[in-house]
Amino acid sequence: MPEVSIIIRTKNEERWIGHCLEMVFKQDFKDIEVILVDNASTDHTVEVAKRYPLARLINIEKFVPGNALNQGIRASTGKYIVCLSAHCVPKETNWLSVLLANFVNDPNLAGVYGRQLPVSFTDPVDKRDLLIVFGQDRRVQVKDYFFHNANSMLRRETWDRFPFDEEVTNIEDRVWGKTVTGAGLHIVYDPDAAVYHYHGLHQGNTPARAKGVVSIIEKVDADVVNELPDSLKPEHANIVAVVPILGRIESGSLQHKLLTQTISALSKARYVDNIYVVSHQSELAGGESIWINRADIPNADTIGMDELLQQVLSMIESRKDHPEALLYVNYEYLSRPAGLFDELIFDAQYEGYDTVFPGYVDFGHYWFRAENEQFKQTDPSMKGRAEREPVFRALYGLGCVTSAVQVRKCKMVGGKIGILPIQDLQHTLRVKEMDDLVLAALLGDNVPEMS
């Protein structure tokens, strides 16, 4: 049985596999076996690799990083396992000896990984990442679970206890690192065990790969990556509601009942700090809300909502109230989903949205008039609902949270946008958009309770 088994995963690595294997077999430590796990290469990767004394060749059709490694390790016999990327080329002939030396007299060492160096033509972004991440000082990682399988070694007995995750599509090495450090073992970074790695740590920082990596890290390290500073958490952020009223509202009218229920719902919202009613009638602002005289806003009845909110924010700030965001609410909606206001604010804070509002999920077919006066479809396909992406009908008045930064720019909707899906058609119903007879038939003598 060899002392060290080297597992190399390949997929169309014809350009690099020969250079990689050349340096592997030049190592001063000779007690090795090399196992190639090839993912259906369509170039000459396998042919080139066969020029070298491989112990085994494993062919796989579907590539999942942890599964590919585990297959290679199961087929191996060494006491120590090396994971090496096919496009990594060891820098020195003592690379393997340096990795192995870390395990001497260190029974709690789970694994060691080495330095990764760019080549002259590595993309500048990848070159930057490699040089920043892989420094020149050796370190022992007790809590830091960063580990990189492009250039690493681990004990077989450790792998027996903690094989690589076969479900994750990226960073199986960091998932493994989290597991072993959580079990009380540690990891070592040894910069003297260096390889050249031309495409870098993040493979060009492509958005799709970055998104995949982050989604896994968020699950592995949720207590860190999903955290916020206390001042940004919804319960500590200063969020104010603004309820504009156009025209007069008669006491006892349907509009008055809807306004009363809207203010009541806002007062019960956990994350709303103050409620500002913008109206010509001071009596509409009860003890739970603050009155802003609409007459103090120039052209208040003719300007758009963008400008109105901008003016209102300025007036609120003149009262020494400095909100981080405004929650615009139209009181004329007949119903709202339970907890809507808090959910909007929660999303705004935790997702970093500059604007977030409800959107009615609609799978209908829509047409618009193009510049040439011809009608065009938003989606010309006639696919069924299950195969089409829905459109969202904006329901700003149900509740629209907008950061103060965007409001000062005279934008109610701007920056990073979030939409909270609304499935129930009843939450789209608004008094002004309904025929009196339909409204009477719908409500009878009752006004629905608003959550």
Image (cartoon, helix red, strand yellow):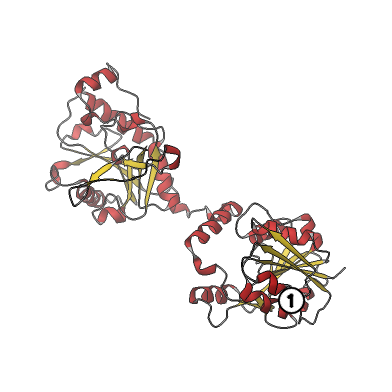
The residue positioned 70% from the left and 69% from the top of the image is: 152
- Whether residue 115 is visible to the viewer of this picture, yes or no, is no
Q: Which of 160 and 258 is in front in this view?
A: 160
The residue positioned 56% from the left and 72% from the top of the image is: 200
Instruction: Give the x, y percent position of residue 400.
Output: 32, 43
In the image, taking residue 393 as reference, residue 228 lies left or right, namely right
Residue hosting label 1: 51
Q: Nearer the viewer, residue 337 or 294?
A: 337
In the image, taking residue 264 as reference, residue 94 lies left or right, namely right
Q: Quadrant of residue 201?
A: bottom right
In the image, taking residue 195 as reference, residue 270 lies left or right, namely left
Which amino acid does the dot numbered 1 rest on? Arg
Q: Quadrant of residue 46?
A: bottom right
In the image, taking residue 208 as reference, residue 221 lies left or right, namely right
Task: Look at the numbered disc 1 and give the secondary structure of its residue.
Answer: loop
Instruction: Give the x, y percent position of residue 166.
Output: 67, 53
Instruction: Give the x, y percent position of residue 314.
Output: 23, 52
Q: Nearer the viewer, residue 142 or 176?
A: 176
In the displayed structure, 296 sits above or below 87; it is above
Instruction: Give the x, y percent position of residue 374.
Output: 20, 47
- Whether residue 327 is visible to the viewer of this picture, yes or no, is yes
Give the position of the N terminus as an image quadrant.
bottom right
- Residue at far right of view: 1
Give the position of the C terminus as an image quadrant.
top left
Q: Quadrant of residue 395?
A: top left
Q: Which of 216 and 285 is in front in this view?
A: 216
- Residue at far top of view: 445
In the displayed structure, 333 sits above or below 178; it is above
Figure label count: 1
